[in-house]
Structure formats: structure tokens, C-alpha cells
Image (cartoon, rainbow, N blue to C red):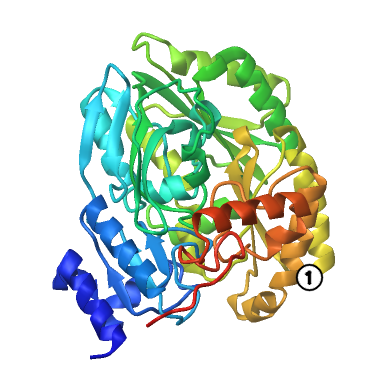
Amino acid sequence: MSTNKLFIEALTQVVGSSHVLTSHHEMAAYCEDWRGRYRGDGVAVVLPASSAEVSAVVALCADHGVTVVPQGGNTGLCGGATPVSSDGSIVLSLKRMRRIRHVDPLDRTITVEAGCTLAEVQAAAEERDCLFPLSLASEGSCQIGGNISTNAGGVHVLRYGNTRQLVLGLEVVLADGRVWDGLRRLHKDNTGYDLKHLFIGAEGTLGIVTAAVLKMVPRPAVRAVAWAQVPAPDAALSLLDTLRRRFGERISAFELIGGTALDVVLRHIPGARAPLESRTEWSVLLEVADVDPDAPLAEKLEEVLMSAYEQGLMTDMIVAASGAQEAALWGLRENISEAQRIEGFSIKHDISVPVSRIPEFLARAESAVAAAAEGVRIVAFGHMGDGNLHYNLSCVDPDNNRRLIEATPVLNRAVHDVVHACDGSISAEHGLGQLKVEEIKRYKSPLELEMVSKIKDLLDPRGLLNPGKVVASQRRTSRM
């Protein structure tokens, strides 16, 4: 009997034959990212149902020298959950691990398994009159393990922070199959190195997150949502400063949306309607929220926005008058990525710069892109409140995208060099994956790259976990 067949049989003994997929047809959806940009292959897709099964599967892989690609909801944009090639990896899907282990409204903590969707975690918190504040457009399908592994951001980072700020403890399967139980519910634990932070944002390259203790916060009782048109990004920045001074931490979101981004949504998303009759190049979607049910947020927000209008910081605005109108306004923002997927290829940049330098970045990047290639359309939008923008490039005529694809390295360099010059990061919330694993070397110092490599070699010396992502590492010699 071949070594490969023995290995597959050993996997089936751990998770059951129906949870080891080996046919090309069964594996296809797990070996391709949702945009269809990254495709790989492997010897099997394995679906464990518990941390113990994950541990046993990883131990088997370590014994056979087989690489492991951990996968959550497979909603990432950088190819971090997709095999890089046909090199004999398994895809380890955590979709069956969906238990809510514990909810404590007094501690404000919720302990969940990695395969829970973000929406399921939100719903479990809501049942206890609490809020798990991480919020993404893909929350119905993205999984909490993937959110943790990419340090996901989303629209409420301005108020609540990235995923990193929402994690108290982790359970992690290491590269040799051992399980680190760090599921602590402590808000303070100052006993040396905080190991959980090694795994948050590591994209499964140091260990596989199987469960987490997450923070919950009091659920807001009232909120107000508004759409405002601004003459330029610097006016939006001044509007943000005005709102911070008047509302403080009650500002939940402040999203900058370019006119081309709105156009793409209106063109491709059924039922989408322009929020205002007039149109400008830039708009802002903002939300304020309060735990006090009697707080007159809508009235206060309208008062502040009218004052901003008189100062020339905006040209028109609407404050949502109902929950349905709030949802419609948020739908315009949350459907931008889906509308772009429908339209076709685009070069995506997930960048961050200091909030104060966003207008500078936008001006310099536009010039750099124009110098690098002709006829490129810029679709810019994102979380202005925390400095994170999605800066995407495409052609109005899809037939020209072949030329754009060929110019991808040049355009990436043009945008990323401007980001670096503005003291920013070339990856703000989507991670590096395989998309930026080489590009990051240009912008990290040699010392920083050396430290990252040493951490990888310490925790995964044979390079078995998610190879080809985040950091170059020593590769294993397969015994298959």
C-alpha cells in the first residue's frame, strides 16, 4: 500500500471518511479563493470537528512531512487560505467547529470555536444583550478563526479597535500537533510575553487557532447614521475632527467613499439607489451610537452636520430616518467589494496611513498611478476614521484589463511607495497572504524581517504551516 494511501486512511480514522475529501470536484471550492484569483491543489481537504481532531490531524501531517493550509470562511482577498501550488498540502477547514462554548455577560466575554461565523458570534452576544463589535461585509460567511488570523478590521475599528483588541485568550494547535490552552478570560495578565499576540495576524503560519475568548461590550440602544457629501478628502478630515470633538467615543464609524466606488455599486447591485440627488467626487458614511436609549443622537447629529455645512465642510447630507434607511445607506458601503467582483478584475490595495495624511496619500497616489499607466480608474473607499483605505485600480472598459494585469507589479510599486513615503503600511486589515509575501520585503527593515523569520523558525521549523504566506520559511521534505 502506498504511503499516500496510508496517510489518507490515517486521516479518515481521525475525522471519519465523509470528512476527508480527495476528489478534484469535492476539493475545488476549498482550493480557490472566492474571487477566483488564486487556485491551488492538494492531497485532501480535511474537516475536523474538535480541537482534539485538529491536533491529531496536524500531528499526522508533521509525522509525514505534509504541509497544512488552515482555512476559515475563505473570504480573504490576499490568497492566505488558498494552497500556493500542487505540492501535497492538505487544506484544513475549520467549518465544522462552530460551538459557542461559554458566554459571560458579567465578564463581558464569549468563548467560541474558530469555525463560528462572525454573524453567529454577534448573534450569541446579542442574546445576552451585549455586542461583539467586529463588523465586516462578509460577516455571514467569514469565520472567527480567520478574523483572528488576519487581525480583521472592519467598519467599527474607530471605536472598538481591530480584532487584536477584542481577543483575551486563544486555544492554538502548534506545528507538531500539541495544543496550547491560552483560553484566559482575564482583562489583565502581566506575566511576561503575551503569547496570543504571536498568533493574531499570523495567518496560520505559526499555529492554528481553534478557539478564542473574545470581549463583548454593552450593546448600543440608539444610533444615528448619516450620508454626507464633501468637497474633498481634507474637508472630510475636518468633519471627522469636528465629530470627534462633539461626540467623542460615540462615533462608531466614519467611512470615506469615492464617487467611482458608489457608481460601481449603483451599476451592479440590484435595488441600490443614490442617497442624494446631487453628486460629488467624495462622500462620507458615518454612524454614532449610545447606550442611553433616551440620547437624542439623530437631532444632535443633524445639528452638528448643519454647522459643518455652514463652514463649507460638506455640500449636502441626509440623516437616516428609519432602520430601513440606515440599512440602505450601509448597503451602499458594504456592497462595494461585491460590485467590483461582479464587474471584473481589479488591482486591490489594502493600505493604511496616519489619519492626518489621507488627503496627501490620495493626491500623491493619483499622480503616481497616472504616471505608471494610462486609463486607470481609481476606486477608493474605506475606514477614514482609522486611516485604512481600499485603493483599487481597474479599467472602465473590461477589455483593457489584460493590459492592466500586465502592469500590476508597476502599479503596486507606485501605490506602495507612496504609502511608505506617508509612513503607512501596505496591508491594513487583510493580511499579506501570498499576494504580498514578496512585496513586504521592500518595506520592512532587514532586522524586522530577521526577527519575523526567527519566530517562524522557532514555532514551525520545518515550514509545515501555511507555506508561501506572510514570510519565507524553511520548507519540509515530504515523506509521502
Residue that protrudes farthest toward the top in the picture = 294
Taking 290 as reference, is 344 left or right? right
* Residue nearest the viewer, comparing 479 with 44: 479
Residue 423: x and y, percent? 78, 42
In the image, residue 81 sits, relative to residue 408, either above or below, namely above
In the picture, the quarter occupied by the C terminus is bottom left
Q: What residue is rendered at 30% in x and 36% in y?
A: 122
> On the image, which quarter does residue 186 sit in?
top left
In the picture, the quarter occupied by the N terminus is bottom left
Which residue is disc 1 drawn over?
Answer: 373
Residue that protrudes farthest toward the bottom in the picture = 1
In the image, residue 474 sits, relative to residue 195, either above or below, namely below
In the image, residue 463 sits, relative to residue 288, either above or below, namely below
Q: What residue is rendered at 72% in x and 74% in y?
A: 407
* Residue nearest the viewer, comparing 78 with 373: 78
Residue 28: x and y, percent? 33, 77
In the image, residue 245 sits, relative to residue 417, either above or below, namely above
Residue 196: x and y, percent? 46, 39
Q: How many marks?
A: 1
Which element type, helix, strand or loop, lies under badge 1? loop
Q: What residue is rendered at 69% in x and 58% in y?
A: 440
* Residue nearest the viewer, comparing 293 with 406: 406
Please indicate, yes or no, whether residue 350 appears anywhere in the rendered image. Answer: no
The amino acid type found where label 1 is placed reads: Ala
Taking 237 as reference, is 273 left or right? left
Q: What residue is rendered at 28% in x and 47% in y?
A: 116
